[in-house]
Image: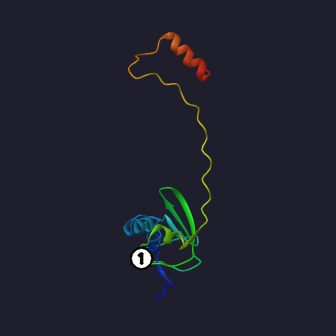
Protein backbone atom coordinates (compact mmCIF):
# COMPACT_ATOMS: atom_id res chain seq x y z
CA UNK A 1 0.00 0.00 0.00
CA UNK A 2 1.42 3.36 -1.07
CA UNK A 3 0.67 6.30 1.19
CA UNK A 4 0.05 9.58 -0.66
CA UNK A 5 -0.90 11.77 2.31
CA UNK A 6 -0.20 11.86 6.03
CA UNK A 7 -1.09 14.06 8.97
CA UNK A 8 1.39 16.88 9.56
CA UNK A 9 2.18 15.86 13.14
CA UNK A 10 2.61 12.19 12.19
CA UNK A 11 4.96 12.90 9.27
CA UNK A 12 7.05 15.46 11.16
CA UNK A 13 7.59 13.05 14.06
CA UNK A 14 8.14 10.08 11.70
CA UNK A 15 11.06 11.79 9.95
CA UNK A 16 12.50 12.73 13.35
CA UNK A 17 12.16 16.51 13.27
CA UNK A 18 10.53 16.10 16.72
CA UNK A 19 11.09 13.29 19.21
CA UNK A 20 7.44 12.28 19.71
CA UNK A 21 4.11 12.73 18.00
CA UNK A 22 2.67 14.55 21.02
CA UNK A 23 5.51 17.11 20.87
CA UNK A 24 4.96 17.47 17.11
CA UNK A 25 1.23 18.00 17.66
CA UNK A 26 1.89 20.64 20.33
CA UNK A 27 4.36 22.44 18.05
CA UNK A 28 1.79 22.45 15.23
CA UNK A 29 -0.83 23.93 17.56
CA UNK A 30 1.66 26.57 18.72
CA UNK A 31 2.29 27.62 15.10
CA UNK A 32 5.90 26.41 14.93
CA UNK A 33 5.25 24.18 11.91
CA UNK A 34 4.44 25.68 8.51
CA UNK A 35 3.47 23.88 5.33
CA UNK A 36 4.00 25.84 2.11
CA UNK A 37 4.24 29.06 4.15
CA UNK A 38 0.96 28.64 6.09
CA UNK A 39 0.67 27.59 9.73
CA UNK A 40 -0.15 23.90 9.95
CA UNK A 41 -2.73 22.25 12.16
CA UNK A 42 -1.80 18.77 13.44
CA UNK A 43 -4.30 17.01 11.13
CA UNK A 44 -3.41 18.97 7.99
CA UNK A 45 -2.43 16.56 5.19
CA UNK A 46 1.13 16.52 3.85
CA UNK A 47 1.88 15.27 0.35
CA UNK A 48 4.98 14.87 -1.80
CA UNK A 49 6.48 18.21 -2.84
CA UNK A 50 5.25 20.19 0.17
CA UNK A 51 7.72 22.56 1.83
CA UNK A 52 7.73 22.09 5.61
CA UNK A 53 9.32 24.60 7.98
CA UNK A 54 9.67 23.50 11.60
CA UNK A 55 11.11 25.39 14.55
CA UNK A 56 13.13 22.76 16.43
CA UNK A 57 15.57 22.87 19.34
CA UNK A 58 18.40 23.24 16.82
CA UNK A 59 16.74 26.19 15.05
CA UNK A 60 14.51 26.56 12.00
CA UNK A 61 14.55 23.50 9.72
CA UNK A 62 13.27 23.72 6.13
CA UNK A 63 12.59 20.47 4.29
CA UNK A 64 10.79 19.39 1.12
CA UNK A 65 8.79 16.14 1.28
CA UNK A 66 10.18 13.43 -1.02
CA UNK A 67 8.32 10.46 0.47
CA UNK A 68 5.30 10.23 2.75
CA UNK A 69 5.57 7.87 5.72
CA UNK A 70 3.29 7.34 8.70
CA UNK A 71 5.45 5.16 10.96
CA UNK A 72 8.60 6.22 12.76
CA UNK A 73 11.61 4.70 11.01
CA UNK A 74 15.36 4.62 11.51
CA UNK A 75 17.37 7.79 11.06
CA UNK A 76 19.01 6.61 7.84
CA UNK A 77 15.61 5.87 6.26
CA UNK A 78 14.06 9.09 7.63
CA UNK A 79 16.70 11.22 5.89
CA UNK A 80 15.68 9.73 2.54
CA UNK A 81 12.08 10.95 3.02
CA UNK A 82 12.91 14.64 2.74
CA UNK A 83 15.28 17.03 1.02
CA UNK A 84 16.92 19.39 3.50
CA UNK A 85 16.97 23.07 2.50
CA UNK A 86 18.04 24.39 5.90
CA UNK A 87 20.71 27.08 5.56
CA UNK A 88 23.98 26.30 7.35
CA UNK A 89 24.42 27.96 10.75
CA UNK A 90 26.51 31.14 10.83
CA UNK A 91 30.11 30.71 11.95
CA UNK A 92 30.69 31.22 15.65
CA UNK A 93 32.66 34.27 16.67
CA UNK A 94 35.85 33.63 18.54
CA UNK A 95 35.74 35.20 21.99
CA UNK A 96 39.05 35.92 23.68
CA UNK A 97 39.57 33.84 26.77
CA UNK A 98 39.44 35.89 29.97
CA UNK A 99 42.19 35.19 32.46
CA UNK A 100 41.08 33.06 35.40
CA UNK A 101 42.47 32.97 38.88
CA UNK A 102 42.96 29.69 40.63
CA UNK A 103 40.08 28.74 42.88
CA UNK A 104 40.84 29.64 46.47
CA UNK A 105 43.58 32.11 45.52
CA UNK A 106 41.76 34.90 47.36
CA UNK A 107 41.09 38.41 46.19
CA UNK A 108 43.42 39.90 43.60
CA UNK A 109 45.97 42.37 44.88
CA UNK A 110 46.09 45.95 43.64
CA UNK A 111 48.92 44.97 41.29
CA UNK A 112 46.84 42.02 39.94
CA UNK A 113 43.81 44.28 39.38
CA UNK A 114 45.90 46.82 37.45
CA UNK A 115 47.32 44.02 35.28
CA UNK A 116 43.79 42.74 34.60
CA UNK A 117 42.62 46.25 33.70
CA UNK A 118 45.54 46.65 31.27
CA UNK A 119 44.68 43.28 29.73
CA UNK A 120 41.03 44.26 29.32
CA UNK A 121 41.97 47.60 27.79
CA UNK A 122 40.58 49.86 30.50
Total numbered badges shown on the rendered structure: 1
Q: Which residue is painted at 47% across and 56% down in the image?
A: 57
| Residue found at the far bottom of this picture | 1
Residue 62 figure quarter: bottom right
Q: Secondary structure at mark 1?
A: loop
Residue toward you, 91 or 76: 76
Q: Position of residue 86 (x, y in %)?
A: 60, 62
Q: Position of residue 49 (x, y in %)?
A: 59, 78
**Is 119 located above or below residue 10 in the figure?**
above
Q: Which residue is painted at 43% across and 22% down in the image?
A: 102
**Is 26 located above or below residue 106 in the figure?**
below
**Is 60 located above or below residue 81 in the figure?**
above
Q: Position of residue 82 (x, y in %)?
A: 55, 72
Q: Residues within 10 Å of mark 1 (few under 14, many from 20)?
A: few
Q: How is the image coloured?
A: rainbow
Image quadrant holding the C terminus, namely top right
Residue 73 figure quarter: bottom left
Q: Which residue is painted at 45% across and 68% down in the image?
A: 28
**Is 99 located above or below residue 11 in the figure?**
above
Q: Which residue is painted at 49% across and 64% down in the image?
A: 32
Q: Which residue is mark 1?
A: 71
Q: Position of residue 77 (x, y in %)?
A: 49, 72
Amino acid sequence: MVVTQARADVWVSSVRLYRTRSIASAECKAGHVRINGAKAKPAQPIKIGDRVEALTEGGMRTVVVKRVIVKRVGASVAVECYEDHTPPPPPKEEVPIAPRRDRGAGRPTKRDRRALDRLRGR
